Every structure is written in structure tokens, then in C-alpha cells.
Amino acid sequence: MAWVTVIGPSIELAASGRATSRSPYPEKWRRLIEEGAGDLSRNGFPGGHFHLADELEEEALASGLRDVRVIGIEGPGAQAIEISRSHDPLLIAAARTLAEAFESQPGLRDLSPHLLAMGRTSGP
């Protein structure tokens, strides 16, 4: 959703200097919006499930893991770095600082493009 509504139009603006209208949600994304389940397509977007961090934590706990921790991997600055395609070490350091500061904060960890769930098994 972010690509169609924000990232794609932002890249177009950066490349051409002119704003484009945000794309409406494609019909095939209705299931993604309503259920969080993506469809594998020939056009490149992988199938998968789009979780909120709390949902992923609940699934990890339900699977039998304990001491579960869910973090945002890239953090809220990741999309800015992706759109700008910047290799500026100061900007990358700033994005990393944001990622580390908010990786576990409820609500803000959901702004990361990817989440990681960790937990322990009840083994020996």
C-alpha cells in the first residue's frame, strides 16, 4: 500500500520534478487491506501476510514460544532512505538512530517495513 500511495508517487516527483496523483488502491489489494493477506503475482509483489507487531507477537505466543519480543528492523526512516536512494552516511546514520530508538516502541515499530519476532522454546 505504501508503494502505491506514497513511495511510487514520491519517486516520480523526485525523478521528474512534477507531482503525480496518488494511485487509488488496486482492486486486487482489497483482500490485503481487509485481511492482511497478499497474493503472489507475476508482476513481482510477493505473497505473504502483513502483520501489525502486536498480531505477530500474538501468533508467536500462540505457537508456543515464550519471552517473545517483536522489533521493527529498518525503522521509520527506511522509506525516506529508499525514496531518496541516498548513500549519505549522515542520513543513513540518522535512519539507523530512528530504527534503534523505536524498534520496540508500540505503534512506532509498525512503521518499519519489516518485523522480526524472537522467542524461546520450552525445550531442555
Image (cartoon, rainbow, N blue to C red):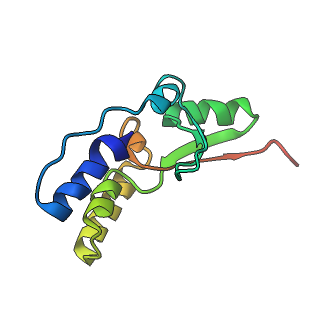
In the image, farthest residue toward the front:
42
Question: Splitting the image into 4 quarters, where does residue 14 fall?
Answer: bottom left
Quadrant of the snapshot with the N terminus? top left
Q: Residue at x 20, y 64 (%)?
A: 15
Report whether 66 appears left or right of 36: right
Q: Residue at x 22, y 56 (%)?
A: 12
In the image, farthest residue toward the right:
124
Report whether 108 appears left or right of 73: left
Q: Position of residue 25 (x, y in %)?
A: 36, 32
Question: Splitting the image into 4 quarters, where does residue 23 fall?
Answer: top left
Q: Position of residue 33 (x, y in %)?
A: 46, 27
Q: Position of residue 91 (x, y in %)?
A: 24, 69
Q: Residue at x 81, y 41 (%)?
A: 122
In the image, farthest residue toward the top:
34
Q: Reply above or below: 26 against 35.
A: below
Give the total of numbered labels: 0
Between residues 42 and 61, which one lies in front from this camera angle? 42
Q: Residue at x 43, y 49 (%)?
A: 113
Q: Position of residue 87 (x, y in %)?
A: 29, 76
Between residues 56 and 9, which one lies in front from this camera angle? 9
